[in-house]
Amino acid sequence: MRNAQSLCLICVFDGLRPDMIRADWTPNLCRLKDRGVWFSQSHCVFPSVTRANTAALVSGCFPGAHGIAGNSVWEPGIEATRILTTGEVNDLRLIQAQRTPLLLVPTLGEVLAEQGLNTIAAGTGTSGCGYLQHPEAAATGGLVYHHAFATPPELADRVASALGPPPVSEDYAAQAVARVEYAAKAVSDVLIPAAQPALAIFWITVPDGLHHRFGLGMPPSVAAIQAADAAFGRMVERLVRAGGYQEVDIIVTADHGYATVSGHININEALQQAKLKRSSDSTDVVLCADGGSCLVYTEPSVDQEALAAFFLQQPWVCAVFSKNGAIAGALPLSAVGCEGPLAPSLMIALAWDERPNEHGFVGMSLTPGGSVAGTGNHGGISPFEMRNMLIMAGPHFREGAVSEAPCGIVDIAPTVLHCLGLPRPVQWQGRVLTEGLKEGGPPLTAGNREETVTFAGGKQVLRLAETGGVIYTAGALIRRG
């Protein structure tokens, strides 16, 4: 690999809502926003879960195309006795053993490797999230550092030798912050000097875990956001001081937004009571429920129309999608970019509303369990979960600008390649964010629209935003009666 002259640094603040970018919480991000471009209408992909969006970030594609349908997936040809968790690196390696490369489209790391350029990644979230940042690192000479694994394996010792052993704390919030601070130093002091990459990806799991555990706006969550912002600021300062690059562009985003948990729905139990699933552990209907969404896999003998009709009548459901758009009353999975060879039979999203939590953060959503009512969750299709934050700053971007054109996490990879002067793969679905570039671009057509489909007793409303031919999911709801 050759040393790069230009660096693109992507930092992901997991679950940081746009309305949390404020001077008293994130002064470093605010300064970056002021000297770069703030994309006020940025969106994640549905389902609004981490691993579907991690893959979207590095592949420039929606889940149906990149092949990571959610945080958990059912692949009986790989593991017949349990649901696979894409948050676990070992489960991803099981999938990768069956299909290589892991994602169905080229990733940033693969594209750069073909040009003789390196990619490094560091993550402080789940091991699966860390792996998906650069899943082909072992085959392309890339570097990945995570507290649970490293690629190559000896990289862990190299980081520990330079920085000391990884931090360990029994206090959840302290551990989350310490891991971010440690990994930030690993990026600036070890990984980038070792590889002189063209691309560095740093995944900051704050505030995601704090939101799940404590809630949006709660003191431990706010304190962790402030500490993570400070660690980000120190990392960028060290990179600038170290030099070595002619140009450094910085992109900061979030993988999804957030809502406050309003209550729980046991989908498995509801289907059994309706005689639509044989038992809690039967495989006629397999439920991969993640936050405010659920992937529904069925055996060929199952009546999918009956399943969809049941979901459409439930007050706790706000959207129902079917594979190939084949079921009357259901929206097509293709409408939200989820149609593909590994798509589930059905997908549902749970109901949401616009009430604020105790700290004034608007947006409530039901979940299938896990997070306590009043704490935070995501995965659903509410506008509070689908909106993410996005800042781009550096020599390629406008200064002090605000773009109100709809855009999304799928556009980051194409924009990175453009800044590095490289062509994008033809399979990618995102676009170059020309509205944020100093050089500009051709006029863009942008707008919002609704798509509706009726069923017995109501209609589904899917809210979409579009710019330059790319369609972003903005929200969905069901109007009954």
Image (cartoon, grey):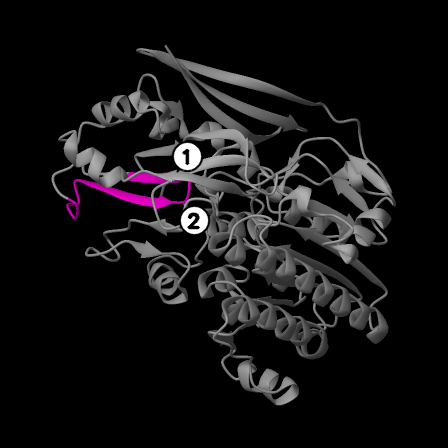
Q: Amino acid at mark 2?
A: Ile
Secondary element at image label 1: loop
Magenta span of residues: 280-296
Q: Amino acid at mark 1?
A: Glu
Q: In percent of the image, x 30 and y 35: which residue is there?
A: 345
Q: Residue 446 at what x, y percent from top left?
A: 70, 24
Q: Which residue is mark 1?
A: 339
Q: Residue 29 at what x, y percent from top left?
A: 76, 54
Q: In percent of the image, x 84 and y 40: which residue is there?
A: 401
Q: From the viewer's perspective, is residue 183 above or below residue 404? A: below
Image quadrant in which the N terminus is located = bottom right
Front one among 157 and 461: 461
- Regarding residue 126, the answer to whether it shows in the image is yes
Which label's residue is closer to the chain start, 2 or 1?
2
Q: Quadrant of residue 188?
A: bottom right
Q: Callout 1: few (<14), some (14-19), or many (20+) C-alpha neighbours within 10 Å? A: many
Pointers 2 and 1 in contact (C-beta within 8 Å) = no
Q: Quadrant of residue 43?
A: top right
Front one among 350 and 62: 350
Q: Tally the marks.
A: 2
Q: In percent of the image, x 62 and y 72: which residue is there?
A: 183
Does the magenta-highlighted stretch encompass residue 407? Answer: no
Of all residues, the one furthest to the front in this rendering is 358
Q: Which residue is mark 2?
A: 68
Q: Residue 372 at what x, y percent from top left?
A: 40, 49
Q: In percent of the image, x 54 and y 47: which residue is there?
A: 56
Q: From the viewer's perspective, is residue 104 above or below residue 234? A: above
338 left or right, relative to 182: left
